[in-house]
Image (cartoon, rainbow, N blue to C red):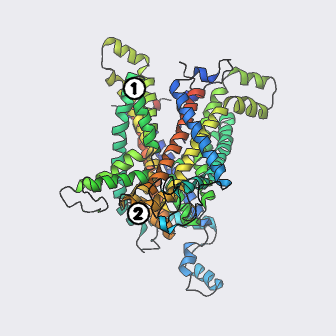
């Protein structure tokens, strides 16, 4: 996930002007492309879940090995075992969709708790959480995951738990910064003076009204991170294993034929990775520009 | 400089060193916990197939002086690590530390080279867009950095291999043929691939641009501009040196992680490929050694960042 600088410390305003009128054109383009990708991913996931596919993704067709795109109804061609690439791409979304959501949920929940502890109460909590953040940042993520693979041979869900935990520091530091900034504001002081419970101040006035957009942005960026991790690991052979399609292991299985000039079996999943990750990045950054930086045009 | 001026800086550097060693202690603890929890410790692996029953195994354990309590195991393990004894690789039987250092040099070439490539691409884009504001060049370069950041590095590696094989007749898979005259050319494809495809370019550009824009709008830069002095000279420290060291230090883990994939694609005999092999073979001591060395590299990077920050900005020691 990305770390944004001090720009993202704004109190949310409740003016009547809708946010899309204040936003820059480019940011709107980013966000609409991102939303398009998100919808595409969700629709494909549902299609895959209900098995509404052009072909059976596991059906081996020996007569049509490595068929180029647009042969015999195979829009994206077939792979080295004659399986339809488009169907495998759609099914491949299942490899990261739910695990990615799990990673996001872990990062957001634990990160928010840490951020609240460090930002609202400060003191010893702050020191402890800064230490934990630095500790988690000391590991290259892929190396840490490889260590876990060597130790436990975990499946993709456990790997995504680790991805989520390594994303905790980013969320925690963002929430912490936001709360430390908000605590100087009069409305928090007024809420304390009125005798509101800490619970209400934190969940309603801080998290819901002011940290909502930060969390949404971090969720989209976290999904991009999860997709990158899943595909990299599946490419390395530690994530989703071969008969089950994943975009990462599709690139790997097509790679042997890449040098012979047969590009499509690995290029199709690679482009899917490229456009999807770019969509989530653009969505996160566009939302950040629109909701957090309040760049007015 | 007088000693009185240097002393607070030295104190601060000592403090950073203390923090770094404390963090490395935590790193070693996490690594130990993972290994401790993993099914089958190296000891039982050693005994497997040699001892018939558990009781004899336990007896051997005591006879060899292997402690059973976890904290005692941790302490003896840690004291071994501190003496540079990382154990021996299960697969090859060679001492881990010397193996990791032997291949770590290759990874160091790869990561430093690719960091330079990233900076060579990102810095001009950041400077131009910070100076000129939002122009056509700026938008195209931003889109370019987004595409490049989302590029799956393994596939990009194949494209570069394909092009360098078919267009230039280079076989980057032939590592170690550096004795030839154009040996350095074989190093280029992986360095380029990792430099472009490590997924950090858009963040580096974004961060550098924001910092530069912030510094350019400071009052002292306005004054420098009004006087007709060079604004580059005045903004160099705050607008360039500090952000660059900061972003490099925070991106080291990402580049090391990307190195795992790129080394796999290019058969580069580095730490990442060794980590992959170790994970494949479940070679605990080796992957443990690699993780600790990688964490040391990351901490070293952030130590250098803090030192640069303190030296460039002596006010930090006054606070």
Q: Is residue B309 visible?
A: no
Q: Could you give the CA–CA distance between mark 1 and mark 2, rounded to whole angstroms? A: 40 Å
Characterize the local packing of mark 1: few (<14), some (14-19) or many (20 or more) Cα atoms within 10 angstroms.
few
Q: Which label belongs to residue A214?
A: none
Residue closest to the eye, A121 or A253: A253
Q: Are marks 1 and 2 in contact (CB under 8 Å)?
A: no
Mark 2 highlights which residue?
Answer: A256
Residue B295, image x, y percentages: 47, 53
Relative to A8, say whether A256 is above or below: below
Q: Is residue B188 visible?
A: yes
Q: Chain of mark 2?
A: A
Q: Give left or right: position of A236 versus A294.
A: left
Question: Are discs 1 and 2 both within one chain?
Answer: no
Q: Residue at x 56, y 75 (%)?
A: B43
Assign the N terminus of chain B to one quadrant of the image: top left
Q: Residue at x 65, y 54 (%)?
A: A52
Q: Residue at x 62, y 41 (%)?
A: A39
Characterize the local packing of mark 2: few (<14), some (14-19) or many (20 or more) Cα atoms within 10 angstroms.
some
Q: Give left or right: position of A120 versus B301.
A: right
Q: Secondary structure at mark 2?
A: helix
Residue closest to the eye, A264 or A266: A264
Mark 1 highlights which residue?
Answer: B136
Quadrant of the image occupied by residue B121:
top left
Residue A169, image x, y percentages: 58, 43
Q: Give left or right: position of B231 versus A5.
A: left
Q: Residue at x 53, y 30 (%)?
A: A29
Instruction: Report the residue that reaches farthest toward the front.
Output: A72
Q: Secondary structure at mark 1?
A: helix
Marker count (numbered): 2
Q: Chain of mark 1?
A: B
Residue closest to the eye, A59 or B193: A59
Residue B290, image x, y percentages: 45, 60
């Amino acid at each position: 996930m990305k770390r944004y600088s001090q720009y993202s410390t704004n109190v949310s305003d409740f003016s009547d002007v809708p946010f899309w009128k204040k936003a820059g054109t480019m940011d709107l383009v980013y966000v609409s492309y991102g939303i398009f990708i998100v919808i595409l991913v969700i629709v494909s996931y549902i299609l895959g879940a209900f098995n509404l596919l052009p072909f059976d993704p596991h059906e081996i067709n020996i007569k049509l090995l490595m068929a180029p795109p647009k042969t015999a109804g195979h829009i994206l061609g077939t792979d080295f075992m004659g399986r339809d690439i488009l169907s495998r791409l759609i099914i491949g979304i299942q490899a990261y969709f739910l695990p990615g959501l799990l990673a996001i949920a872990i990062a957001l929940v634990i990160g928010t708790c840490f951020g609240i502890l460090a930002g609202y109460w400060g003191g010893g909590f702050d020191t402890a959480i800064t230490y934990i953040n630095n500790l988690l940042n000391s590991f290259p993520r892929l190396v840490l995951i490889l260590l876990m693979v060597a130790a436990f041979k975990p499946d993709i869900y456990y790997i995504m738990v680790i991805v989520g935990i390594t994303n905790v520091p980013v969320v925690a530091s963002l929430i912490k910064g936001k709360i430390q900034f908000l605590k100087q504001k009069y409305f928090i002081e007024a809420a304390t003076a009125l005798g509101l419970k800490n619970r209400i101040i934190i969940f309603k006035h801080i998290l819901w009204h002011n940290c909502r957009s930060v969390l949404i942005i971090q969720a989209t960026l976290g999904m991009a991170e999860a997709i990158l991790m899943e595909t990299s690991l599946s490419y390395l052979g530690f994530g989703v294993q071969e008969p089950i399609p994943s975009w990462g292991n599709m690139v790997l299985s097509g790679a042997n034929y890449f040098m012979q000039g047969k590009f499509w079996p690995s290029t199709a999943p690679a482009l899917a990775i490229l456009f999807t990750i770019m969509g989530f990045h653009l969505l996160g950054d566009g939302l950040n520009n629109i909701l957090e930086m309040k760049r007015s045009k | 400089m007088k000693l009185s001026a240097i002393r607070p800086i030295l104190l601060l550097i000592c403090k950073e060193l203390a923090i770094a060693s404390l963090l490395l202690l935590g790193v070693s603890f996490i690594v130990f916990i993972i290994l401790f929890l993993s099914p089958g410790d190296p000891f039982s692996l050693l005994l497997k197939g040699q001892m018939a029953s558990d009781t004899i195994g336990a007896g051997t354990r005591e006879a060899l002086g292997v402690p059973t309590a976890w904290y005692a195991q941790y302490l003896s393990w840690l004291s071994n690590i501190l003496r540079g004894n990382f154990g021996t690789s299960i697969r090859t039987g060679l001492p881990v530390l010397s193996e990791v250092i032997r291949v770590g040099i290759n990874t160091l070439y790869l990561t430093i080279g690719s960091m330079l490539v990233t900076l060579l691409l990102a810095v001009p884009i950041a400077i131009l867009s910070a100076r000129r504001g939002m122009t056509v060049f700026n938008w195209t370069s931003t889109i370019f950095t987004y595409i490049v950041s989302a590029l799956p590095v393994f596939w990009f590696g194949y494209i570069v291999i394909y092009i360098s094989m078919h267009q230039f007749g280079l076989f980057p898979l032939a590592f170690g043929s550096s004795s030839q005259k154009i040996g350095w050319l074989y190093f280029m494809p992986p360095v380029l691939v990792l430099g472009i495809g490590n997924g950090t370019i858009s963040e580096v550009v974004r961060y550098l641009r924001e910092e530069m824009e912030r510094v350019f709008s400071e009052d002292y830069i306005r004054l420098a501009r009004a006087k007709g002095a060079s604004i580059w000279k005045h903004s160099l420290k705050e607008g360039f040196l500090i952000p660059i060291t900061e972003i490099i230090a925070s991106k080291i883990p990402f580049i090391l992680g990307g190195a795992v994939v790129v080394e796999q694609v290019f058969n580069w005999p580095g730490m990442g490929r060794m980590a992959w092999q170790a994970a494949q073979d479940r070679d605990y001591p080796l992957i443990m050694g690699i993780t600790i060395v990688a964490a040391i590299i990351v901490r070293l990077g952030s130590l250098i960042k803090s030192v640069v920050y303190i030296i460039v900005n002596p006010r930090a020691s006054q606070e």
